[in-house]
Image: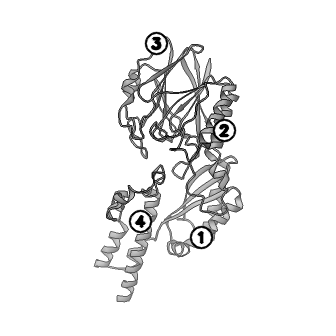
Amino acid sequence: MFRFLHAADIHLDSPLKGLEEYPDAPLQQIRQAARRAFDNLVQLAIDEKVAFVLLAGDLYDGDWKDYNTGIYFVGKMGKLRDAGIPVFMVSGNHDAARQITRSLKLPENVTLFPHAQVGTEILDRYGVAVHGQSFSARSETDDLVRNYPQGDPLLFNIGLLHTSLNGRPGHEPYAPCSLDALRSKGYQYWALGHVHQREEVSIDPWVVFPGNIQGRHIRETGSRGCTLVSVEDAHVVSLEHRELDVLRWALCRIDVALCDSLDRLLDLVRETIHEERVAAEGRPLAVRLVIEGITPLHGPLYENSLQLHEEFRAIAANLGDVWVEKALFNTRKPSCAAAVFAGDSPLESLMKSIEAMQFDTATLIEFIPEFEKLRSKLPSELLNDGDPFRPGEEELSAIREEVKELLMGKIEQRGHHEN
């Protein structure tokens, strides 16, 4: 029997987004999070005495600002070399051959598969064949799987690939392929990368996205790590998710329907953050609060939103190693339109239309002429995962409610004036 580690989407030296604006946030801890998670990966490989490590793309987060990123990686690979552990890796969209202009000679235990064709490495000691192909450019739109060789029936075959598979929400459709195409190769394990949420796509054969090793923003909540795979007689006998992250993100929804005061809301926020703190098992925690529900406190919440945000931050600070990344208010008044207008008046109809108002990201973009043209001139690092110019559903919902609140307030004032 032997074991190996499968990890992906390391994004070395990628910043964590949403915390650096706070003077009390641990900036050094935030900036070093990806490296510290990778330190955990290397130590886990040594502690578990694995046969080899697979890195399925996006080791880097784009071109290095200087050589320190590469020097750090080479140093960690040297530590694995000294432990007798080889490493096999492919580049993905963030570290494609044309993305990285600097380079350093890799230790002899590291194999980076080529981008011009599929490469194969045989580990005779374990009866394993590892097949892989790197991205040549950031936007890889070809199906790379078609070039992978058929599996050797006498070996345990592993396919190492950075891909969106048949598409995943929030991820660009790079190197698209189908599950049937993967199965047709006769491999026992497909080690995939690119999708940051852990997913066991198939068990026959095993097709696995391990997720990234460290959440980088609020869209990457919960446990992050790698997959430890045990193999016996050329068959996978177990898979284990191993946590590596050093700072965790949490999205906390708080229903204020039953709150009868702002003090009760603060108590509920404290209880919710405490529960997340326990679940994080001692890791520093970044929290987004979504205050939602139908409540008579709707007006006071919006009127006191700035003060409440500072109260939330104080609660988090008191609990220790917790930071509120953002607080969004998404509440509604109970039957607000009917309370102001009676009958079938045009103002009542307008109020109801505002209540039902919806808009998506595309609609928001259409509100601003030449938005995409302007966006295309921005630095690429602003447009990676967590792109602030493409808000998520939570941000959209909050914006929608703020617009409704402003419009309805104006209409109510006008209605009272006319009455």
Disc number for residue 153: 3
Viewer-nearest of discs 2 and 4: 2
Identity, as a three-letter code, of the amino acid under mark 4: Arg
Q: Position of residue 18 (x, y in %)?
A: 56, 57
Labelled pair 2, 4 in contact (Cβ < 8 Å)? no
Labelled pair 4, 3 in contact (Cβ < 8 Å)? no
User: In the image, is 25 to the left or to the right of 339?
Assistant: right
Q: CA distance from mark 2 to mark 1?
A: 38 Å
Instruction: Indicate which disc, 4 or 3, sits on the residue closer to the N terminus.
Output: 3
Viewer-nearest of discs 1 and 3: 3
Give the residue at mark 4: 400
Q: CA distance from mark 3 to mark 2?
A: 36 Å
Q: Closest to the observer: 97 or 50?
A: 97
Give the residue at mark 2: 39
Q: CA distance from mark 2 to mark 4?
A: 42 Å
Q: CA distance from mark 1 to mark 3?
A: 63 Å
Identity, as a three-letter code, of the amino acid under mark 1: Leu
Where disc 4 sits, the SS reads helix
Q: Assess disc 4: are there few (<14), some (14-19) or many (≥20) residues with their C-alpha within 10 Å of its C-alpha.
A: some
> Quadrant location of residue 45?
top right
> Quadrant location of residue 346?
bottom left
Q: Assess disc 2: are there few (<14), some (14-19) or many (≥20) residues with their C-alpha within 10 Å of its C-alpha.
A: some
Where disc 1 sits, the SS reads helix
Q: CA distance from mark 1 to mark 4?
A: 20 Å
Give the residue at mark 1: 308
Q: CA distance from mark 4 to mark 3?
A: 57 Å
Q: For the point 62% across and 19% down, which residue is it?
A: 2
- Residue 397 appears anywhere in the view: yes
Identify whether 8 is placed above or below 299.
above
Viewer-nearest of discs 3 and 2: 2
Labelled pair 1, 4 in contact (Cβ < 8 Å)? no
Identify whether 99 is placed above or below 81.
below
